[in-house]
Image: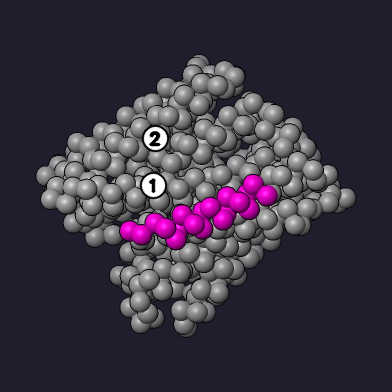
């Protein structure tokens, strides 16, 4: 590849991956916003209509573990284009659905595309950029994914109010077509056609992740925790069965040798724990604004713009901060600041002014953005070319489960405090939850201390 084409690839590849990430995250949160509206459109109970979210999430969980080996065998370019095509076709079918059952089937198709799309985009960036440029490239990919959930309520509520709900799905089509065009030109093509896939290992692992993800979604919808707890136990048994199988299989989906790489194993564990707090933010802030201040979904989305703006503003500062402090020191300090920013929401009540709320959200968005970029980068930093696909795929799987766990944990904490303190003011329940989310996040800071203190 000549210098001009190499420069184009370095510029456009992370942008294409970022657009795909943004499209999927925006679609998910916009759809979540209009679930009550869709219940009236299809004349179905709200509990049944919520399957629109659950079916997509389960399809995601089932196929994310497969992305690594598919990329190794067929190349990132083919898999990413196939993912965009599947996601776009699923979006089209969602938009033309005439019944709830048709929409549910279309959401499964869309979920398969989304599952393949996001990890492959990240892997393509990891394969293309040298380590000293990786933090900048991955920050470009990560930030749109953070802003998508924040403006999703504006898009979803606005379209439902002023246009028609199918438009939410149709807006994905031009992005999908453009993504396929640029991916065919600039995505990497390296592959190993002789690679063997552990089919049974995939089935066992995917079943475990799907069961755990589904159970976590139930925690946020019920006050009776026995059923989801049993499902999680079954999922954990499947996960243990996969781990035992991987120790003795010649071609495991995720090689146990991955965990001998210190930055990967510590980064993965740190990601898992930190996202128990971080993953709750897109759930907690809109809920707080709507319950405490009585905002509509559209107004709530507008009010959350400081989060999105500061997340984008953080991009130029991440690499500079890591260059000065090193990954270990940066993540330790930044995680503690992030923990403090979550606890600071204990200052918010029914009478809080917009200056306070906007300031807190601006700080949270800025620190959150740097946290995600640094965590994701350090986890894959030391992976060899042979391990990049499976390592990136496992990171995506952990992100999926931990984000769902974050929502589940916050929902459980809110419910527990509402049960224990029946006569407390609504703000008190949120204060209790924010406090514990901050403490959970702080724990991950002491995991990141175990990292080697590499600099860019």
Q: Position of residue 216 (x, y in %)?
A: 46, 54
* Residue 234 belongs to magenta span: yes
Question: Can residue 218 be seen from the camera position used here?
Answer: yes
From the viewer's perspective, tell me whether residue 160 is left or right of residue 116: left
Residue tagged 1? 409
Q: Which residue is mark 2?
A: 440
Would residue 90 appear left or right of 306 to someone viewing this image? right
Image x and y of residue 41, in percent = 36, 79
User: In the picture, which quadrant includes the N terminus?
Assistant: top right
Bounds of the magenta span? 223-241
Q: Does residue 344 sit above or below 50 in this rendering?
A: above
Provide the secondary structure element on which disc 2 rests.
helix
Q: Are marks 2 and 1 in contact (CB under 8 Å)?
A: yes
At horizontal 72% and vertical 37% (from top left) the residue drawn is 256
> Of residues 263 and 170, which is closer to you in this image?
263
Relative image position of residue 120 (x, y in whole percent): 65, 49
The quadrant of the image that shows the C terminus is top right
Numbered disc total: 2
Which residue corresponds to the image point at 46% horizontal and 40% vertical from the top-left?
275
Q: Name which of mark 2 and mark 1 comes first in the sequence.
A: 1
Judge whether 99 appears above or below 54 on screen: below
Q: For marks 2 and 1, give the CA distance.
A: 10 Å
């Amino acid at each position: 590849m000549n210098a001009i084409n190499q420069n184009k690839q370095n510029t456009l590849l992370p942008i294409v991956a970022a657009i795909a990430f943004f499209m999927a995250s925006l679609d998910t949160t916009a759809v979540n916003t209009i679930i009550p509206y869709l219940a009236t459109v299809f004349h179905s109970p709200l509990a049944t209509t919520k399957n629109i979210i659950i079916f997509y999430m389960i399809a995601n969980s089932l196929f994310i573990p497969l992305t690594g080996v598919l990329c190794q065998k067929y190349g990132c370019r083919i898999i990413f284009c196939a993912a965009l095509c599947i996601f776009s076709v699923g979006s089209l079918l969602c938009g033309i659905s005439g019944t709830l059952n048709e929409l549910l089937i279309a959401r499964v198709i869309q979920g398969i595309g989304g599952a393949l799309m996001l990890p492959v985009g990240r892997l393509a960036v990891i394969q293309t950029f040298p380590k000293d440029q990786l933090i900048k490239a991955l920050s470009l990919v990560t930030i749109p994914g953070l802003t998508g959930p924040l403006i999703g309520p504006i898009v979803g509520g606005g379209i439902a109010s002023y246009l028609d709900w199918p438009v939410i799905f149709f807006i994905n089509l031009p992005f999908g077509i453009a993504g396929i065009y640029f991916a065919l030109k600039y995505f990497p093509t390296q592959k190993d056609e002789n690679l063997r896939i552990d089919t049974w290992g995939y089935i066992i692992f995917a079943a475990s992740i799907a069961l755990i993800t589904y159970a976590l979604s139930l925690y946020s919808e019920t006050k009776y925790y026995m059923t989801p707890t049993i499902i999680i136990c079954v999922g954990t048994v499947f996960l243990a069965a996969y781990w035992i199988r991987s120790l003795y299989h010649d071609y495991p989906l995720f090689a146990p040798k991955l965990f001998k790489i210190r930055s990967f194993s510590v980064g993965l564990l740190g990601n898992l724990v930190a996202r128990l707090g971080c993953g709750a933010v897109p759930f907690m802030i809109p809920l707080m604004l709507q319950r405490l201040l009585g905002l509509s979904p559209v107004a709530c989305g507008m009010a959350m713009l400081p989060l999105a703006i500061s997340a984008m503003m953080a991009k130029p500062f991440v690499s500079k901060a890591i260059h000065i402090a090193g990954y270990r020191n940066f993540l330790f300090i930044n995680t503690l600041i992030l923990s403090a920013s979550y606890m600071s929401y204990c200052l918010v009540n029914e009478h809080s002014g917009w200056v306070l709320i906007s300031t807190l959200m601006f700080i949270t968005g800025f620190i959150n953005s740097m946290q995600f970029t640094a965590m994701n980068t350090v986890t894959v930093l030391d992976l060899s070319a042979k391990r990049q696909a499976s390592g990136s795929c496992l990171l995506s799987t952990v992100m999926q489960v931990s984000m769902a766990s974050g929502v589940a944990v916050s929902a459980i904490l809110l419910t527990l405090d509402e049960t224990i303190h029946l006569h407390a003011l609504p703000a008190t329940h949120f204060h209790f939850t924010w406090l514990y989310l901050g403490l959970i996040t702080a724990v991950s800071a002491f995991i990141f201390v175990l990292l080697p203190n590499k600099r860019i």
